[in-house]
Image (cartoon, helix red, strand yellow):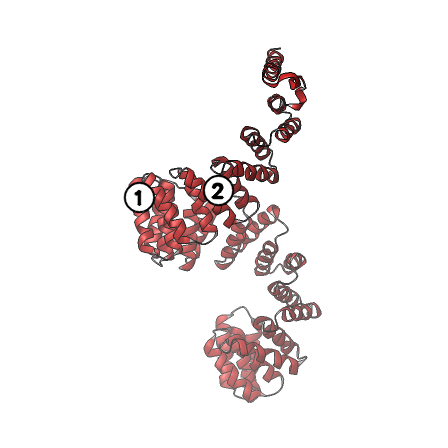
Amino acid sequence: MALNKMKSLLIITVLACVIFTGGADAFNVEATSLFHYIMGMLYLYDGEVDKTVHEFEKAVSLDDSSLLLRKSAMELYFSSMDYDKTEEEAKKILQLNGDDIQAARYMAEIAAIYKKDINEAVKYQKKVIELEPDDIQSRFFMAALYGELEDVKSAEREYKKIIELDRKNIQVYFLLASIYEYEKNHKKALKCYKRLMRMEPGNPGIYNGLGTLYYNMKKTSKAKKLFLECLTLDPDNLKALYHLAQINEDAGEIEKVIHYLEKINKLQPNIVQTHVHLGIDYIEVGRIDDAVEIMRKAAEIDSEKSSVWTIMGIALEHKKIYDKAIEAFSSAIEINPNKKENYFHLGLCYDNLKKHEESDNAFKKAINIDPGFAQALNYLGYSWAERGVNLDEALVHVKDALKAEPGNGAFIDSLGWIYYKQGRHKEAEQLLRKASKLVEDPVIYEHLGDVYSELGIVGKAIASYRKARGLDPDKDELKNKMNKLRKGK
């Protein structure tokens, strides 16, 4: 009831204004811009935006030089997110009054955010600052625009002006420090952070910022100390936890990496990448069951991420659950068919199950993706040598692998084993002796023993088998080979 009375009062007021200022033509109320403006305001009060827009546009059409009408229309368009019309009105307002700060602000914001025209945004924002030189937020926006243009010096100038206006502004010192870091001016960046420390000694963000700066300066011990101090202030600070995980990863301290990643995972249990990282680290330290479990949880969060299935497959492969590992690698390949590592591990699993046709196909697909993929070239060649098939092609593959990694003991062993299978025992002996000096591996010593056995060098054959058995005491075949040679004596 009160609202209706208010509307009636407003309409009567408008009519009175029209009658006493417009003469005989004033009764044609629809011909007056004031009437449409007031009607628009009433519709706006009721939340009827479309009707408001209609009335404002009618009002402007009748009096296109009215700043009040155009500014009201501009505000309405902006609040309705009609940025094209906002821009149109703002331009007309600036033609009527070049010092209208709100129109200049809208022009700058629209140019920067919606048109992505940063140079145009800078032009209008300069006008805003000219009109209100002491407005700190306007200068922050201007600095951000300069940052987009990579005009670091101009951005720095704006931040320094903000400091002149407000020396206690925490944000500006953070941003100025980032400018100096970008310029590799570590001395000035350190000065900003030390000032911040004096201003807010209990702010964890400052410890993180200074710690990151020291980390980038390769001053790891100082960085680590700051991140640890940050955790004393805020034990759940994710940035500090991430940085400490990274520092320990750089140092090869995998157990400590796991410690921090597990904390992160508790705080953010739905981040797949953390699960994947933990899965990799669990595998590295031999916690295979934990790796399988964390990747199972990762798959529940996002089953469309290929890395989830890759790490799951590797964990299952370590557990020798090859059929399930094959399912995991197949899922990874379905999501990302261009990742060579998935085909390689798929080939390993099939090979362990003696499904040689499938393993050969998987290795070949890995090599098709990357013809220089040394691991796949070597394994396919070695697998053929073990079966005594495609020996000439196997020789080419392993030699190609050695071109990429000439000092790889396992690859040298594969080449020696191919020579053995081809009956080139002296060449095989030379290569296998070299491989045995590079890698302590029972398979290499067994291969060397087999070569010595063929060459009739029984003592060296038995010695090689003995070394192999010392590294793999559960392999009964080694004992049988030694007994056979002893009986042959």
x 53%, y 39%: residue: 95
Left or right: 264 in relation to 424? left
Q: Nearer the viewer, residue 156 or 292?
A: 156
Mark 1 Cα-neighbour bin, 10 Å: few <14, some 14–19, many ≥20: some
Q: Amino acid at mark 2?
A: Leu
Q: Quadrant of the N terminus?
A: top right
Left or right: 148 in relation to 81? left
Q: What number is the disc on residue 197? A: 1
Q: Which residue is mark 2?
A: 267
Up-down relation of residue 119 to residue 100 (above or below)? below
Q: Secondary structure at mark 2?
A: helix
x 42%, y 42%: residue: 140
Q: Quadrant of residue 324?
A: bottom right
Instruction: Give the percent coordinates (x, y) of residue 326.
Output: 65, 60
Q: Secondary structure at mark 1?
A: helix
Q: What is the CA distance from the residue labelled 2 to the residue labelled 1? A: 27 Å
Q: Amino acid at mark 1?
A: Met
